[in-house]
Amino acid sequence: MNERILFSGHTMGAPGRDIFEVIKLFKQIGYDGIEVRVAADGQIDSEKLSDDEARKIFTAAKQESMAFSCLTSYYQNFVAAGEREKVIKNLKRVIDIAAILQCPLVRVYGGVEPSSQPGIWFNDVWSRTVSGIQETAEYAARYGVRICIETHIGSLTMSVRDTVRLIEDVNMANVGMLFDYAWVELAGVEGGAEAVRKAGRHIFHVHVKDWVLESRTPLKKKSCLMGQGTVRWAEALAELKRIGYTGYVSDEYEKYWYPEDLPEPEVGMKHNLEYVKKHLL
């Protein structure tokens, strides 16, 4: 476990570049580590990557003195019949890869929104998500890997309040929070320093990104560089520093999703790294 703040870049910030290119790029920018988008079109496709290929990636990172901070998976539905078993199986494979890469964390969504599961009561959506994460986390514990549930739109866990409730219901030492403050603020339950305080001891990992919010309903926003948007980052980062957070702060630079909004990572991610360091160190 880290005893200081470290900084990683998310590979979604460098679409079109393979994992080996990103390792060198993030080293050049000045990051301590790498968070990897694990998807069919990500820098790692867990459903195709062999153990030998994972070992080559680990060796390449080690040669550059770069660590892996988190593997970001997109498997989400612990509820629907026919989906649940596939989701858990695929998450276990992501955990296998994390173990090879000596990556301490795997991101897991806090399930799916109940509205996406017609005919299933909220309590059943919740309980199936809890038990699915428990099964995943039990497997992860064998390898010393921790699960971080993200505060994210489109899940059961957009606010800190709901994420803490899910973590407490799962009730496992290796399950905590991926604190993505931009989404927490948008959820509107908590904001600024209050959100950080309430997340507190549950935080395993932190995402940073900024946007200009134009409207909440319908949701309309534009990605931008840190400090240039409407997210209350100065307050949130100051509170993270005050509570003594240690671990990775990862730049979820959304170039993959919004290529026209953001400059190339050599420019934009470097700016973001300097911004968060100024507020946290």
Image: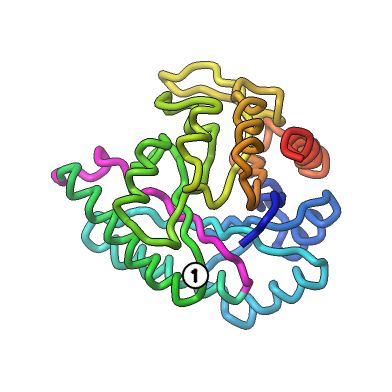
Q: Where is residue 155 in the image (x, y as percent from the top left)?
A: 37, 42
Q: In terms of depth relative to the viewer, which is nearer, 189 or 202?
A: 202
Q: How many marks?
A: 1
Residue at 57% over, 50% down: 205
- Residue 56: image quadrant is bottom right
Is residue 239 shown above or below 79?
A: above
Q: Where is residue 136 in the image (x, y as percent from the top left)?
A: 38, 66
- Residue 108: image quadrant is bottom left
Question: The C terminus lies in which quarter of the figure?
Answer: top right
Is residue 47 shown above or below 274?
A: below
Is residue 238 shown above or below 13?
A: above
Identify the residue at the far right of this view: 28
Q: Where is residue 232 in the image (x, y as percent from the top left)?
A: 60, 24
Residue at 44% over, 50% down: 149
Q: Mark 1 points at which residue?
A: 95
Is residue 192 shown above or below 84?
A: above
Structural crowding at the residue carrying mark 1, measured as other residues with C-alpha within 10 Å and reported as few (<14), some (14–19) or many (≥20): many
Q: What secondary structure prevails in the magenta region?
A: loop
**Does dot 1 land on a helix, a strand or a loop?**
helix
Magenta region: 101-120
Indicate whether residue 255 is drawn in magenta: no
Residue type, label 1: Ile
- Residue 34: image quadrant is bottom right
Q: Position of residue 152 (x, y in %)?
A: 45, 40
Question: The N terminus lies in which quarter of the figure?
Answer: bottom right
